């Protein structure tokens, strides 16, 4: 037992053993290209609404603007994760089921994730079609985790 205590003290001299990784899928948000251009270091701007998993987005909420002019295209879908633990890798797979379709959905190729402690945004593309967008997230590391969430778009853009 003393050998184990000595090994822990040598590995973490301050006595703080790293906490196990924990992730939470906070929800989904719509941002503009200034945010998505930041890649894995992107931060959610103040005032941006986060839609919890299972939300139904209706009306003209987060509709993209037209191309051109000095304003960037907005309405870009991101998934929002909160994470504690050591930096890790993972993947996010998005499946789209068109509105009114009896089909199972169309999965995209997985997005590769680099997850650091704190809030992480993963861009899921310029999703303009109405339907259900389901995301499955897998985090690797010392304590692998699987998360899932979905958002339904029923907008009139």
Image (tube, rainbow, N blue to C red):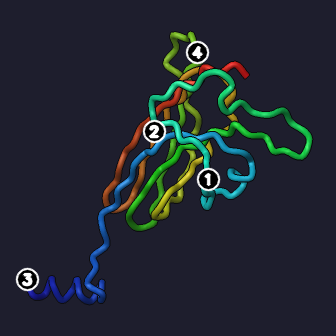
Q: Which numbered disc, 3 or 2, marks the residue that appears first in the sequence?
A: 3
Q: Residues within 10 Å of mark 2 (few under 14, many from 20)?
A: some
- Residue 117, above or below 124: below
Q: Give the label on residue 46, or none.
A: 1
Quadrant in the rendering for residue 58: top right
Helix, strand or loop status at disc 1:
loop
Task: Determine whether label 3 and label 2 are within 8 Å by CB.
Answer: no
Q: Which numbered disc, 2 or 4, marks the residue that appears first in the sequence?
A: 4
Real-space Cα distance between discs 4 and 1?
31 Å
Residue 107, image x and y in percent? 55, 30
Q: Give the label on residue 1, or none.
A: 3
Real-space Cα distance between discs 4 and 3?
60 Å
- Residue 25, above or below 98: below
Q: Residues within 10 Å of mark 3 (few under 14, many from 20)?
A: few
Residue 54, image x and y in percent? 45, 29
Q: Residues within 10 Å of mark 1 (few under 14, many from 20)?
A: few
Outermost residue toward the left in this view: 1
Pointer 4 residue: 99
Q: Residues within 10 Å of mark 4 (few under 14, many from 20)?
A: some
Is 4 displayed left or right of 28 in the figure? Answer: left
Real-space Cα distance between discs 1 and 2?
26 Å
Task: Determine whether label 1 and label 2 are within 8 Å by CB.
Answer: no
Quadrant in the rendering for residue 8: bottom left
Real-space Cα distance between discs 3 and 1?
49 Å
Instruction: Please identify, in this view, whether the residue under mark 2 or under mark 4 is nearer the observer.
Output: 4
Pointer 2 residue: 136
Real-space Cα distance between discs 2 and 4?
20 Å
């Amino acid at each position: 037992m003393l050998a184990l205590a000595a090994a822990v003290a040598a590995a973490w001299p301050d006595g703080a053993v790293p906490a196990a990784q924990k992730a939470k899928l906070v929800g989904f948000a719509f941002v503009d290209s200034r945010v998505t251009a930041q890649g894995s270091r992107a931060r959610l701007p103040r005032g941006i609404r986060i839609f919890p998993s299972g939300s139904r987005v209706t009306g003209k909420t987060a509709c993209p603007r037209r191309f051109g002019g000095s304003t960037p295209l907005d309405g870009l879908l991101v998934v929002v994760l909160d994470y504690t633990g050591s930096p890790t890798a993972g993947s996010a797979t998005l499946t789209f089921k068109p509105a009114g379709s009896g089909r199972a959905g169309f999965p995209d190729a997985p997005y590769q994730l680099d997850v650091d402690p704190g809030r992480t945004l993963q861009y899921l593309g310029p999703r303009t079609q109405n339907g259900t967008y389901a995301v499955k997230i897998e985090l690797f590391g010392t304590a692998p985790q699987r998360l899932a969430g979905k958002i339904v778009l029923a907008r009139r853009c």
